[in-house]
Amino acid sequence: MAMVDAARLEALVAAIFERAGCAPDEAGRIGHYLTEANLTGHDSHGVARVPRYVDWLREGRVLAGKEVTAVVDTPAVTVLDGHYGFGQTVGPQAVRIGIDKAKANGLAAVALRHAGHLGRIGDFAEMAAAEGLVSIHFVNVVGSILVAPFGGVDRRLSTAPYCVSVPLEGRPPLLLDFATSLVAEGKVLVASLGGKPVPPDALISPDGAISGDPAVLYGPYPEGPGPRDPMMGPGAIRAFGEHKGSGLAFMCEILGGALTGAGTTGPDKRFCNGMMSIYINPKVLDPDGFFPTEAAAYVAYYKSAQPVAAGGEVLVPGEAEARAKAKKLKDGVPLSDGAWDSIAATARELGIGDNVIGAALRAG
């Protein structure tokens, strides 16, 4: 297990993408958002994806230096094309437009199509919450057929993330952010690199047998930091929550994919994210100021439930992420040896010296 300093990890990832052809500001954003995912405990959307992102850039599947353009633009509704640019660039641009419209009008809907991998959607929800806005996000992954629907074994869904964030006065926002698959594909990737195993029922084989073996998704793969292709395995990831998770994933495909114009997931489609986002200004919706007091009271009531285990605690959405970030900023970001080796190998391929790579590691 490698323990890496968060700030130096962010700088190393930024250096990798600058060497790979991104402008310094874009490389910095990629470094920031990928590291932030690890800090908040979403390793599946974090720095383990660096080699894959670099490969996508080389292959032209994601493009550097792109900005969103408006396909439809009204005071409350915008449809944006991300032109297959890095999600860490076009994603924040789309969110900024949603924030500005919701502040002006009380409500906004922003449809983003053709975005590169957006990463952790919670980053964008937190961006809106920091400006006092509620936000809801339905996301799909076009061209990424990974998940079997409830009652089936064939892949028909993407991991289809769903996210909601609610600002609260005097405390971090409430944040619900998850893939509608039982685990994100990135968690299977992390497990394949020697990180935390996935649950033993996370994957399903063509014969209906459930499994936690990453080879069900990737097929045979090399030891160490070699490539992983989720399209090469015979099986699929399972949807969480049986019919409920499968149904929510289906709606993410319809809203995030079909409604935005990105397209639903399926064979022979170019990889991209679609994101349908709704932004609400509580100050417009709630002129009497009822919401902040009632929400805070409910948080306290919810957390007062007796824990299952002695010494345990009931957490509201977002608390685990906030605590994980505080701990990792203090102690360092833990990465499996496989994940760290794959990042280091990519850095070396791009001409970054071992002195720079090694500087990110914490002693001991």
Image (tube, helix red, strand yellow):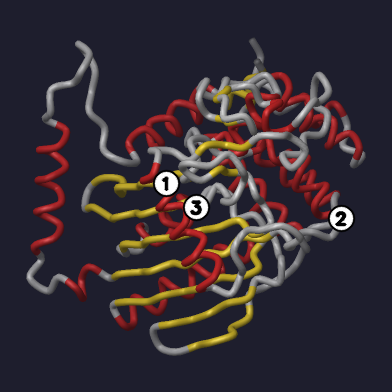
Quadrant of the image for the N terminus? top right
Residue 233 picture location, percent across and down: 73, 34
User: Which callout, 3 or 2, points at the residue further toward the start of the chain?
Assistant: 2
Residue 81, percent from left and from top: 63, 75
| Residue contact between numbered discs 3 and 1, judged by CB atoms under 8 Å | yes
Residue toward you, 243 or 39? 243
Residue under circle 3? 121
User: What residue is shown with label 1?
Assistant: 177
Badge 2 marks a residue whose secondary structure is: helix
Residue type marked 1: Asp
Q: Nearer the viewer, residue 275 or 76?
A: 275
Which structural element holds mark 3? Answer: loop
Residue 134's disc is none
Of all residues, the one furthest to the bottom in this rendering is: 74
Q: Secondary structure at mark 1?
A: strand
- Quarter of the image for residue 178 reads top left
Coordinates of residue 199 in the picture (x, y in percent): 51, 23
Give the residue at the far front of this rendering: 207
Asked whether the residues under the numbered discs 1 and 2 touch, taking CB atoms below 8 Å apart as contact, a structural biologist would say no
Choose the circle earlier in sequence order: 1 or 2. Answer: 2
- Res 251 quadrant in image: bottom left
The amino acid on which the numbered mark 3 sits, given as a three-letter code, is Ile
Residue 319 lies in quadrant: top left
Q: In this rendering, would 223 be left or right of 205?
A: right
Q: Are there few (<14), some (14-19), or many (20+) residues within 10 Å of tag 2?
A: few
Q: Give the amino acid at mark 2.
A: Glu
Q: Nearer the viewer, residue 270 or 238?
A: 238
Q: CA distance from mark 3 to mark 1?
A: 7 Å
